[in-house]
Amino acid sequence: MVEPLLRVQRLFKRFGGVSATDDLSLDVLPGEIHALIGPNGAGKTTFIGQLMGEIRPDAGAIHFDGADIGGFSTPKRVRAGIARTFQITQLLSDQTALDNVALAVQAGQGHSFRFLKRAAEDSSLRAPAREYLNAAGLGARADVLVCELSHGEHKQLELAVALATRPRLLLLDEPMAGLGASESRAMVAALKRMKGSVSILLVEHDMDAVFALADRISVLVYGRIIASGAPADIQADAQVRAAYLGEGES
Amino acid sequence: MSLLMEQALNGVQLGVTLFLLAAGLTLIFGIMGVINLAHGSLYMIGAYAMAAVAAKTGSFLLAFPAGLAAAGIAGVLMEYLVVRRLYARDHLDQVLATFGLILFFNQLTTILFGRQPLFVEIPDFLEGSVMIGGIVRYPVYRLAMIAVGLATAIGLYVLIARTRLGMLIRAGATNREMVRALGVDIRLLYTLLFGVGAMLAGLAGVMAGPILSVQVGMGEQVLILTFVVVVIGGIGSVRGAFIGALAVGMVDTMLRAYLPGVLRQLMAGPDADALAAGLSAMGVYMLMAIVLLVKPQGLAPAHG
Amino acid sequence: MDDPLKRAMAPRKNVRSVLLVALALVVLAVLPQLADMFEQPALVSLATRIIILAIAAASLNLALGYCGLVSFGHAAWYGVGGYVVGILYNHYVSGDPLFGLPLGTDQMLITLPVAILVSGLFAAVFGALSLRTSGVQFIMITLAFAQMIFFFFVALKAYGGDDGLIVRRRNSLPLIDTRDGATFYWICLVIAIAWFALLRRIVASRFGAVLAGVRQSERRMAAIGISTYRYKLAVFVISGMGAGLAGALMANHARFVSPDMLHWTQSGEFMIMVILGGAGTLLGPAAGAAVLILLESQLAAFTEHWQVILGPLLVLMILFTRGGLSGLWKLLRGGSNG
């Protein structure tokens, strides 16, 4: 049996009286794409927040590559090799796409207490940044300001920025949401190209994308995993159909 | 023992004054998201209006409501003309615009009343002092201040926790759209609320009038102390404002009362007094620093 | 699709702004001669003041405009810088030891660096505390701590307390007569140019890129693995050092320091200069300082109650022009076109 890259055990999180995460256990194997699906409000984004250390769980353990990262701050988890994209994009809007990625490259090169050399002419930042933009399919728009990019391009840029931190585990929060058909296809193609080189936890509503990409699927409803398995099993699972897939098609 | 008791009462009295200011400031911030530097100006306006009417008519009973009304009206005008346009702005814009208001109000007050401080007599029926518990004689006026302050605190609590208006206030802080959906004119609600905050500040100014000198700049001194209270208590929280105000009132009063004596045992009299004055003035800021180190969000933060 | 066009236009715009800056520098360099020519002797002193305040405003702008740290306490670092000059001079004249050592001096080559270091130290201590908060609490806390330092100097009776300290003669430099007004003006001008050049390098550096990131999204910074606290503290300290430098120069210019330098309204004025000129632009704070000081001196000549006019002007500026003077310029142009 392969050691999982990410292992989450018995995670709990309540907000007031509401359970956002309820006894959630899940793992992601090296190189796999593990999709997490579920209706709106199931607690998917809250779960990602807890994996990143942005939200503190009430109980439970998170191990990454064998190490307990429960006490790590967000930046420390990123340096350990986890990166996320945001469903509601968090980009530096006054700057170009390339600037955004270059800053993430810079963050991976150690401290930024360098005061005098011009960062904009630093090829050790710009060249890798261009490659990550290419990988996300945004190479042609490198020098455009973020505020002038389209919604779909924001999603691609989120992906490029996350890649630039050289993660071993990518947490993607609805990368297809709000994309047009062709943009979705481009995103699926980009993710397919990465498959194998990085493990991915994919939170997504677009079932076509999920079934095209995922090695395994887990279904989250009201903070609980109600089913987990290969795509074909999930499709066949009566409980899942009732709780989620049925609703999605109606 | 009686000195300690008296100083403790003084601390409570300063505390309730600060609470009246901090409650308004923190409510307005918590609900409308506006930081209003000119909150101290409303305190000053209350005090000046009260002093002016008292000087003209000689009647405290007229001067008291006049001060409240002046602060309330000034607050409503301030909201209507300026602050309303700042709700959607960042804190920096709010700070600078209300800083402009302070310059205006201070200078206007100088033009109207001059630079000399005004003094207000304590009204006859609150003159004198009473014996409390057979231990300490305490001025009636200051006792009345404490009573009014505590009554206001209780009233605010009831208003927020128990009434429909309070429900709207709490709902408005978390979900504006929902309040709007209830058919409430949120602009009017905000204006009213700002007026209430202004009257609380005015009340503090009116009550402080007879025991302080009424002068230009009094608003900012108390404003900065109010900030300390709000930071210590946790921003947006009326309960926190109450705790913070009493803590600041008590620490400030006790340091001023006892530090000179302590230091005089260590060094020469005049040096000790000068050092004690400085340390006392800095004391509440030290308190703030300590609270920050332990609980950056304040002692009783609004949410969670 | 107009990107190529924009790119083609950009160099021309750059050439124009380089020419403008060069022209401004030439005018500034010969300002004392111009003042002589037009018989405006007060002009040199006024310009010195503006240049010094521009240094302080630009320093605040590094934290406020570039990194989004709304510090309402920068007068404290400015005042500390001033007091370093005042206290060192005081000991130089009296010969009394400072911390048990004969440390008094009137040498500018010593006093300025010491002022910068001491202000930086103060900013480091209080910044480390204040930066535990953010948003509106940060505004309140920086204001409150600055007020605390203000009270510290008021209570410091050994150095004048309320009354402040007189610096009877300007700090001296080898070979240069700093007592001459024009000479001191040039000294300040050279220091200001050096400081602005340094700021320009800083904001374009890797460090500067992190500052811009912190301003726009701290969440994003964490998500790419950057712990922001140390960078915020660093920029707060650099910014405080610049304010301290300005304070030290002002102590020399006015030959006087007092707690008034640390008054909270002074912090407010620095913020106004930054916003007036345009936060997050290199030269904006200098323009803001010039406009505010000239406006104040014009209004003050008109009435002693000039603040009753300045206050509402400020309110109107914030409400109706976004981005200070450049916003006003856009508003006026927009108005005349449509």
Image (cartoon, helix red, strand yellow):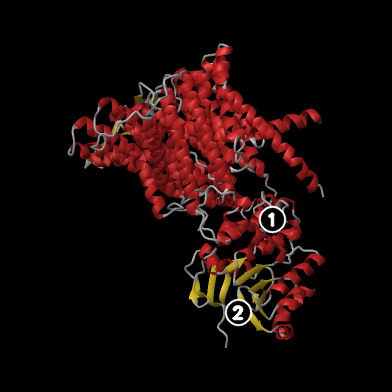
Q: Quadrant of residue C155?
A: top left
Q: Quadrant of residue B29?
A: top right
Quadrant of the image for the C terminus of chain A? bottom right
Quadrant of the image for the N terminus of chain A? bottom right
Label 2: which residue?
A30
Residue B212 is inside the magenta segment: no
Total marks shown come to 2
Label 1: which residue?
A97
The answer to whether residue B34 is seen in the rendering is no
Where is residue C130 shown, x and y percent of the image? 45, 47
Point out the stretch of residues depicted in magenta.
A26-30
- Describe residue A210's horizontal placement relative to residue C163 as left or right: right
Local SS, label 2: loop
Amino acid on which the number 1 mark rests in the picture: Ala
Where is residue C53 shown, x and y percent of the image? 51, 30
Q: Chain of mark 2?
A: A
Q: Which is more toward the observer, C219 or C173?
A: C173
Q: Chain of mark 1?
A: A
Farthest bottom residue?
A1
Amino acid on which the number 2 mark rests in the picture: Pro
Residue drawn 57% across and 57% down? C221
Q: CA distance from mark 2 to mark 1?
A: 30 Å
* B56 w.r.t. A161: above or below: above
Q: How many other residues sit within 10 Å of disc 1, few (<14), some (14-19) or many (≥20)?
A: many
